Image: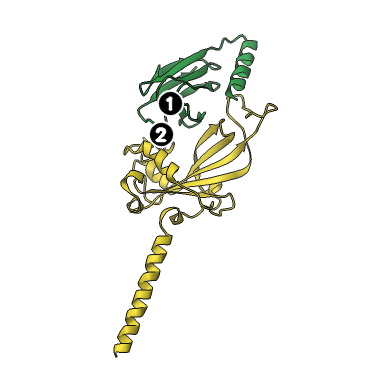
């Protein structure tokens, strides 16, 4: 689903001369890498679980809330960054795992 | 006289039995009642898109508890948190449609209402490995009837991942308070 949303977002932004990019985030050793991201509207977070346990990418910040569901080892999920502002992504299962994201 | 004493004892035992039975009925999810008209009486503190489930989740809290917590007091006993689901509007491809901000669009009425409520001493009913402080959970149909045979192990298990005092077994409420506390 999100891949279609992301593809549409990229197409819309491309039509307006805006270059969107994919930003890869790996989950390994109970950490997100990178854990601080400055992105542009239309960019896409690509969340790759390279760990041995399941994680997720739960955005709890008011106004930005999304949870694409659990991400098993080897799985990838995407979050399109279509709204400007600052939010935190966290793993619902492991409360020390967080990413600070700013969308400009 | 002896007969009278026996009768009094029998009445006492019956009353005690009824009290215990009533107490056991009030354990767990049964302690929590459905908050009628919550979407108007309560305050909205979060919306979570769930593309994997094709639902949009709305989170509400009773206003007195929100006021107390915003003022910096501990989340009080009696705090009622609501997680209410609506179906997501779907596009022609059968996947959730989104607005210009990439947010999913809810449509229709509630499809499920789940509650998290804090009561003094409620945690005493649970073993240490399945205890979320003094929080309990309950699930309802939109008409306020209880969902039969609902299991709550997954509620306790998942919320147990937020057991620090600053999170108080909540995923959204604690971050919301951090971002919206009165200075």
Q: Nearer the viewer, residue A95 or B179?
A: A95
Q: Are marks 2 and 1 in contact (CB under 8 Å)?
A: yes
Q: Chain of mark 1?
A: A
Q: Quadrant of residue B87?
A: top right
- Do discs 2 and 1 belong to a common subunit? no
Quadrant location of the N terminus of chain B? bottom left
Query: Which residue shows up at 43% across the image and 28% down it?
Result: A54
Q: Nearer the viewer, residue B40 or B21?
A: B21
Q: Name the disc covering residue B175, or none.
A: 2
Instruction: Tell me if residue A37 comes above or below residue B53 in the rendering.
Output: above
Furthest residue to the bottom?
Answer: B1
User: Which residue bears the numbered disc 1?
Assistant: A88
From the viewer's perspective, tell me whether residue A36 is left or right of residue A13: left
- Mark 2 Cα within 10 Å, few/some/many (few <14, many 20+)? some
On the image, the x and y values in percent for residue B71 come to 36, 41
Q: Nearer the viewer, residue A9 or B101?
A: A9
Instruction: Tell me if residue B162 comes above or below residue B123 in the rendering.
Output: above
- Mark 1 Cα within 10 Å, few/some/many (few <14, many 20+)? many
| Chain letter tied to yellow | B
Can see residue A91?
Answer: yes
- Specify the colour of chain A: green
Q: Chain of mark 2?
A: B
Instruction: Tell me if residue B116 comes above or below residue A8 in the rendering.
Output: below
On the image, the x and y values in percent for residue B24 come to 40, 61
Furthest residue to the right?
Answer: B92
Instruction: Tell me if residue B122 comes above or below residue B179 in the rendering.
Output: below
Q: CA distance from mark 2 to mark 1?
A: 9 Å
Quadrant location of the C terminus of chain B? top left
């Amino acid at each position: 689903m999100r891949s279609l949303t992301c593809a549409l977002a990229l197409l819309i932004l491309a039509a307006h001369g805006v270059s969107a990019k994919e930003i890869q985030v790996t989950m390994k050793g109970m950490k997100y890498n990178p854990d601080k991201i400055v992105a542009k509207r239309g960019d896409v977070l690509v969340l790759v679980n390279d760990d041995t346990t399941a994680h997720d990418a739960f955005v709890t910040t008011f106004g930005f809330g999304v949870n694409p569901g659990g991400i098993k080892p080897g799985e990838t999920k995407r979050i399109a960054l279509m709204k400007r502002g600052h939010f935190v992504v966290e793993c619902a299962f492991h409360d020390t795992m967080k990413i600070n994201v700013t969308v400009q | 006289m002896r007969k009278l004493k026996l009768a009094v004892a029998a009445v006492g035992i019956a009353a005690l039995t009824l009290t215990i039975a009533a107490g056991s009925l009030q354990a767990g999810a049964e302690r929590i009642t459905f908050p009628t008209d919550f979407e108007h009486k309560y305050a909205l503190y979060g919306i979570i898109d769930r593309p994997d489930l094709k639902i949009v989740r709305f989170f509400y809290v009773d206003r007195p508890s929100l006021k107390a917590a915003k003022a910096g007091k501990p989340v009080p006993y009696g705090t009622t948190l609501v997680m209410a689901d609506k179906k997501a509007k779907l596009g022609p491809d059968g996947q959730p449609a989104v607005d210009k901000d990439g947010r999913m669009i809810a449509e229709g009425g509630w499809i499920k209402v789940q509650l998290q409520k804090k009561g003094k001493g409620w945690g005493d009913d649970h073993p240490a490995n399945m205890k979320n402080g003094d929080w309990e959970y309950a699930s309802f149909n939109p008409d306020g009837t209880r969902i039969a045979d609902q299991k709550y192990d997954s509620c306790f298990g998942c919320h147990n991942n937020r057991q620090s005092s600053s999170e108080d077994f909540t995923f959204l409420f604690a971050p919301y308070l951090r971002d919206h506390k009165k200075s």
